Amino acid sequence: MSAWKSTPLSRSSQRWLSSLSSPQWCKSSRPLPPLLVLVVVVVVAASLTTVSAQVQCPDYIVDACEAWSDPGTWESNVPTDGDVVDIDKCVILDTDTANLGGITIQPTGSLVFEPGTGNKLKLRTKYIRVEGLLQIGSEQCRYEGKAVIELTGERGDHTDPDFGQKYIGVTNGGRLELHGERKMPWVKLDQTLHTLDSLADPYFDSKKGEMHEYWSDGINAVVINPDNGVVRASTSFNVGTNNRWWFEKDKPRFMSFLDWIPANHVVMLASQKSALSTVHNTTEILDSVEKALYCKIGKSRLRNLQPGETWVAIGVKEQPWRTIERVGRDVSTDGLRTASADLMMPWLNAAFYVSSSNHYTRAWFKDTRLIAGKYDDLAPVLNVTGDVRSWKSGLLDNMHYGKVTQGVDMRAEVAVLSRNILITSADVYPTCVGDDGVEIECHYADVNFAFGGQIKVLEGFGTAHLEGVSLERMGQLHVDNEVVVVVVVVVVVVVVVVVVVVVVVNLLLIQVENNVAYDIVGHCFHLLEGGEKNNVFRGNLVAGTKALDDSDETFEKRESSAFFITNPLTTIVNNVAAGGDAKGYTYAFPPAPLGASSGLGLMEEGEAKRTAFTAFDHNVAHSYFYSGIDLWKSMQASGTKLSWNSGYNFKADPRNESSPDVKCVMKMCTGMFLTMKPIIIIIIIIIIIIIFIIITIVIIIITSIIFLLLLLLIVILIIPHYNFHQF
């Protein structure tokens, strides 16, 4: 017993144990016995001791580091909202920051996120200029807490000549070290998985009853006994209406319903359009919801729900620790705000799922789904091609094919999108700001005016490693007439709802490996100027690239690609381009390197078209509207438009046009479900047939006219000389 007493617990462990010793329970529940609390303390302490003995983590904290929360660290006091912070020493971020005006980490300074499994740290600032070190975890000691860097502000708040606005920028000598938990980024299915709609005998499915036809504002509710799957109640409450008669009719009915729910029964709740009225008093309704879900007042996220947001909850009556709430705030590129939650009870072979969606601009649109069934049916074992023990269980929205058919690997890709280090942006949606600074109403198609954050690394940087990091709501277009989002040396990064993911500009020997990029507008991985040589893209998955809805003829808007390659000396191996509006892989070389890459001797005029590709092996492209691989284009010298006729003529010495020809080999690649190509071929054939018919008709008409003219000429020449008097 003395061993664990002498081992100090971290503050996060102390907070956790404190919450165990004084929980909030319903009257039918009982607190943990003291013996169980004692066992938990022993296990936690022993675990900490074991880890400490094996690996000396963290390996990046020095004794001289000072705490952010300590007023003595700063000249005046702990930074507050709007402060611009200069860091010239080692500072440990041990608390959430205020909404800062900016951070500059001087060459002698370091900003390090405090390690710890229980830590949840959020840094909010308009920019971070890294001349020294910004560190979250390390290669050997991965960060195990939850870290969020949120870039804030609108256009014009702060502009840096090197980085622009709303950025994490790494300067000459700067070091960016972000190391999240290790996760298998993506795998392939090894069996076909079916949707929730295919369930033969669910306990309940809102799509198969009257609830699916319910269109009024309010909350849908279902109560089920998880022991036997019996549905005790399913109904809707019109408590989101501003009509007084309907509201006063359904308010007491909803409150009575919540009070009636039997103990240990599962209740599923989902907002439909507007969850609660915005003009009538809903305090009593909120109190009733919280009593049903938490056995206490003041806990529900429903209290702070804003107009247009969606809300769902799943709970077990008188078991508040099982309650799950979700709020849909962010607008997807489909214009939807969606909230979803699931509750898995494998010990009862039961599973429950609820979701709610609203459209940002189309107020009439709604979609709610409440479904319950056997755990084995709703959450089948996922047979995949890799080790995904670090993933969490969930439910399927669509059918996913998982077989190799006639030698073609048609197995669906499965990716995990969550990471414990998140870099995101505020003030991106729903309000968009045009180039003139005027606020405009926007939806997913107005991404031209979205103002997300960016990560940019300048030449001469010290290090830039991103592992186990998620980038969300990032990217900028129409900033000084160029696309600006640069991430260098990227490993295992998830990107969700982004305008362009990785732009490599005038950089060599960059490795972009094992990333997942999802829901991207514009190109995803983009070599910009044609001088970027010897870069490697390996093991990346790109899904859901979207073309910009714009009349501009620039290629990045009409022909968005998962991989847009402008230099042949690029290694592209084991990547998957998994669907989008336009193309999977596009090779388009400029006559010579453009922009900052020009005049450096990287490629001579026309050299790119005479250079065989370094490697294009074992890549997959499927589910694209135009083509999986486009080799037909070249980039114009302007750098903004593409031309037909790539003009490839691969040579042994690309700088010598008279040198022998060589082969350019692209091997073991798979393409499927590329919808537009057959249509284009059919259309071309039809057009050729029509043209042939038209030409034939024209020839016949012209021939007939000529014949008639000749006949008329004969008549004119012969008839006047004929002697009619002979008759």
Image (cartoon, grey):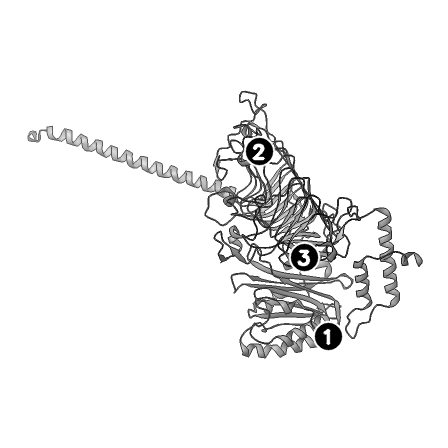
Please, what secondary structure does the residue beneath circle 2 have? loop
Determine if residue 69 is in view: no
Residue 268 placement: quadrant: bottom right
Q: Nearer the viewer, residue 554 or 674?
A: 554
Tag 3 residue:
79
Q: Earlier in the sequence, mark 2 or mark 1?
A: 1
**Residue indicated by mark 1:** 262
For mark 3, does the 10 Å Cα neighbourhood hold few (<14), some (14 to 19), or many (20 or more) residues?
some
User: Residues at badges 3 and 1 in contact (C-beta under 8 Å)?
Assistant: no
Work out whether 339 lies above or below 473.
Answer: below
Q: Residue at x 7, y 29 (%)?
A: 726
Residue beneath the point at 58% across and 79% down: 248
On screen, residue 49 versus residue 683, left or right, reads right
Of pointers 3 and 1, the one earlier in the residue sequence: 3
Residue under pointer 2 = 531
Within the image, what quadrant is residue 197 found in?
Answer: bottom right
Q: Nearer the viewer, mark 3 or mark 2?
A: 3
Q: Nearer the viewer, residue 128 or 291?
A: 128
Q: Is residue 561 left or right of residue 171?
A: left
Q: For numbered disc 3, what is the local secondary structure?
A: loop
Give the Cα separation between the discs numbered 3 and 2. Answer: 43 Å
Give the amino acid at mark 2: Gly
Residue type indicated by callout 3 = Pro
- For marks 2 and 1, give the CA distance: 68 Å
Amino acid on which disc 1 is placed: Pro
